[in-house]
Image (cartoon, rainbow, N blue to C red):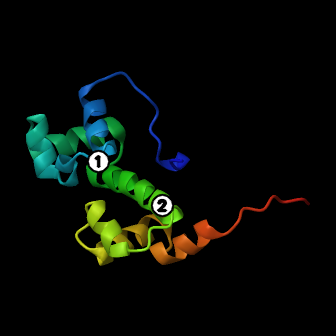
Amino acid sequence: MPHLWLRVAPRPITRSSRRRALIGEGDPAAHGLFPLAAMLGVSPYRLSRAFTRELGVSLTRYRNRVRLGRALDRLEGGESSLGVLAADLGFADQAHLCRTVREHLGHTPTALRRLLAQPVTADRG
């Protein structure tokens, strides 16, 4: 189940929604500004500026949110190798994954794995 804080409300098909779709679908071109710009037929500068203007968040931050949502899903599903997870999600290496997770979520992937494995209990107070 995708994490709610990462969802983007459905919008009409526009250039910006195509950009978001490429990133959300994990298209290999979305792993970097230059390949994504080339795929969309715009300059990297223009793509970066338009993305931030239209969505209020940088392309990198948006891409990281999407990748972190996938990371959380895989950690919750029992992914055991952070190196494999980092490579699959387009991070430079395991350390890059760990830094990004900590920056955005305040915990390391290992700590999140433990938190996600804990049973949810209802407050009966």
Q: Bin the neighbour count of mark 2 within 10 Å (Cα to Cα): few under 14, some 14-19, many 20 and up.
A: many
Residue 103 placement, left or right of 5: left
Secondary structure under the numbered disc 1 in the rendered image: loop
Residue 65: where, in percent of width, then height? 39, 54
The numbered mark at residue 26 is 1
* Residue at the (36%, 21%) spot, across then down: 12
Residue 119: give x, y in percent of width and height. Answer: 70, 65
Which residue is drawn at the image coordinates 31% and 42% (left, top)?
25
Question: Residue 69, image x and y in percent?
Answer: 44, 54
Direction from residue 56 to residue 77 in the image, left or right: right
Q: Nearer the viewer, residue 115 or 36?
A: 115
Q: Where is residue 30 in the image (x, y as percent from the top left)?
A: 21, 48
**Going by the picture, which residue comes out furthest to the top?**
12
The disc label shown at residue 72, or none:
2
Kind of residue indicated by mark 2: Leu
Mark 1, other Cα within 10 Å: few <14 / some 14–19 / many ≥20:
some
Q: Name the residue type under label 1.
A: Gly
Q: In this view, does 115 lie above or below 9?
A: below
Q: Which of marks 1 and 2 is nearer the N terminus?
A: 1
Q: How many marks?
A: 2
- SS class of the residue under badge 2? helix
- Up the image or down, 110 lies above or below 24; here it is below
State which quadrant residue 70 falls in.
bottom left
The quadrant in which residue 100 appears is: bottom left
Question: In the rendered image, is residue 87 in sight?
Answer: yes
